[in-house]
Amino acid sequence: MILSSKKLLAGVALVVATAQPVLAQLNFESGNTQRVQNSSDPRNRAKIHTELGAMYFQAGNNAVALDELRIALNADSGYYQAYSVRGLVHAGLKEYAKAEDDFQRALSMAPNDPEVNNNYGWFLCETGKERQSIAYFLNALKSPLYETPDRAYANAGTCALKANDIDGAQGYLLKAVELARDGAPLARLQLAKLFYRRNILEESRIYLNDAVKQMEPPTAEALWLGLRLERKLGNRVAEGSYASQLRSRYPTSAEYQEFLKGKFE
């Protein structure tokens, strides 16, 4: 399975929560990152360059991301967060053996770190090891200091659904919606998919509508589900609207190709 940066980022938690304030401070103080390079605190240098690496990865610049992470680990080879982020970059580049190695190094240093467990769980899920991934999401949830437990619940639900554990998926996803502070559009989309599979169509529509309202723009996955859902419900106007959006926004997507082939199920 090929992983894209966008798909990986949907489920992971990069160490970029403080990246913008750090960058703003650096620009204000010196106009460049020279002060970071000359910092006498190796851990601080590693932290900042890891944040920079994560930001470049988010922007799709994998080469620079890897360079920043190399600098981070040269500054402090024990900064496990850098291995975790580098694992995601390697995964995005389809360098799965290198990704596995980086995640294992991070886990060996911090076996109970929630972000490392969440990121590795998502990597496993996206590389065809959905059932194995659940244990890592649950391990992330054991930490009382985990700031985004809804993310791990959503990931566990998404991966359980891929593994055809429908009951488990529903429980995880409902918990994600309960805990989320951002409306949980991705968890709601997965719940919509789950209820669609169970043929509980009105419930599926409720969760899908909630998810789409929070997306800008809605994903191809959401539009394709909406198209098939409204087709089953017999709402041709809504079906046509979803089809039009899918065509205009994502003409090269796998979902639109399925639509052209008439593969609605």
Image (cartoon, helix red, strand yellow):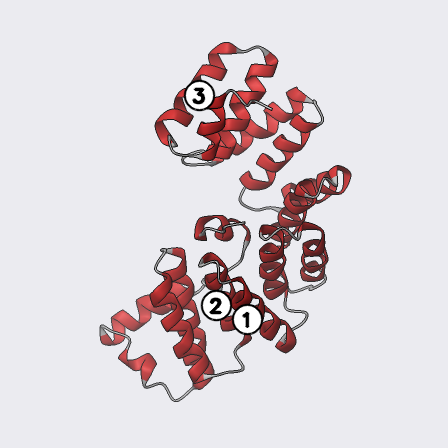
Mark 2 falls on what kind of element?
helix
Q: Residues within 10 Å of mark 2 (few under 14, many from 20)?
A: many
| Lower position in the chain sequence, tag 1 or tag 3 | 1
Q: Nearer the viewer, residue 179 or 230?
A: 230
Percent of width and height locating residue 69: 42, 73
Amino acid residing under circle 2: Arg
Q: Quadrant of residue 62?
A: bottom left
State the separation of the CA atoms marked 2 and 3.
38 Å
Amino acid residing under circle 3: Ala
Q: Which residue is mark 1?
A: 102
Percent of width and height locating residue 83: 52, 72
Q: Which residue is mark 3?
A: 243
Q: Nearer the viewer, residue 49 or 254?
A: 254
Asked if the residue under mark 2 is in contact with the one under mark 1, i.e. CB atoms within 8 Å, the reply is: yes
Residue 86: mark: 2
State the separation of the CA atoms marked 1 and 2.
7 Å
| Lower position in the chain sequence, tag 2 or tag 3 | 2
